[in-house]
Amino acid sequence: MYVWIQPQDSEQIQQAHILANQLQFPLIIQEKQPDIKADFYLTFDKNYLILHPQDKTLGKGLCVDFVEGKMAFRRKYGGGKQQPLARAFGLHKGEMPDIVDATAGLGKDAFVLANLGCQIQLVEYSKIIAALLENGLQRAQQDQEIGNWITTRLSLICADSKIFLRNLEKKPTAIYLDPMYPARQKSALVKKEMRIFRQFLAENDTGEELLEVALNVAQKRVVVKRPMDAPFLANKKPNAQIMSENTRFDLYFTFNQ
């Protein structure tokens, strides 16, 4: 996967240099894109880190924004502790677990849980996706309305979740898994965001091994998010399920103290 980093103006050059060193990607400082083949390029635009695909059928770009847009709407009108995601972790019954989100992605579900009061450790394997998420968290921390709890409830590490979980000294109350589901036959049915994600994740990583690790680490439960029609992860039947319109949450209760 070939990616370059290109700041949009002179004020972003220092920030782009830091990211280029961090990710070990080439830095391009010029107005026109170079005549080289790249699958994606990263740009800074008004402090937003944006991942642009060269394949324009994948959309204009991908970034993380917790302050405005869809995430702001979900925070305000998502259903609180009665929404399926919150119920999957027992928040509707007064529980307030500390959670490891072992497949963090763009952090959307973790953001919702943190907004409801949970402490979340985000773990993301892809260094590019982690960079987008870190940028979104940094900007959210500056927001007057949500910055305080973003800072205190959400933390991010770029790592292999299986290794991270095995090395934890303190077991989390719960672990959340949202593994990539195998691609459908018709790519048009898959959201552009998910099609970009697939470029940075191992195609054969189904999450089965991660589930086994999680079941041996979580103190009380592992929650697995699945499409409604998907088989159980690792063909392992859950202890309970929470249903939503298009997805379900498979609950595995554990007793690891």
Image (cartoon, helix red, strand yellow):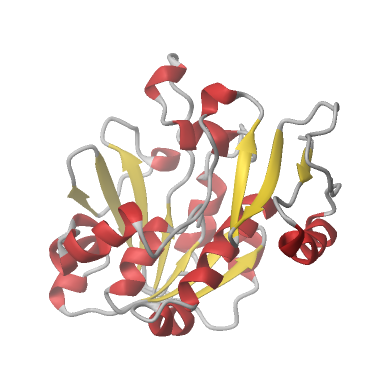
Residue 24 visible in rendering: yes
Residue 257 visible in rendering: no
Is 188 rendered above or below residue 232?
A: above
Residue sitting at x 85%, y 26%: 35
Is 82 rendered above or below residue 26?
A: below
Q: Quadrant of the N terminus?
A: top right
- The residue closer to the viewer here, 193 or 231, is 193
Direction from residue 61 to residue 128 in the image, left or right: right
Residue sitting at x 17%, y 59%: 83
Direction from residue 245 to residue 220 in the image, left or right: right
Q: Quadrant of residue 93?
A: bottom left
- The residue closer to the viewer here, 183 or 45, is 45
* Residue 159 horizontal/vertical position (percent): 67, 61
How many labels sit on residues?
A: 0
Direction from residue 249 to residue 10 in the image, left or right: right
* Residue 143 horizontal/vertical position (percent): 42, 76
Residue sitting at x 72%, y 61%: 12
Is 120 rendered above or below residue 25?
A: below
* Residue 74 horizontal/vertical position (percent): 25, 58
Q: Quadrant of residue 163?
A: bottom right
Q: Quadrant of the C terminus?
A: bottom left
Direction from residue 221 to residue 47 in the image, left or right: right
* Residue 178 horizontal/vertical position (percent): 43, 49
Residue sitting at x 51%, y 60%: 102
Pick out the residue farthest to the top: 186
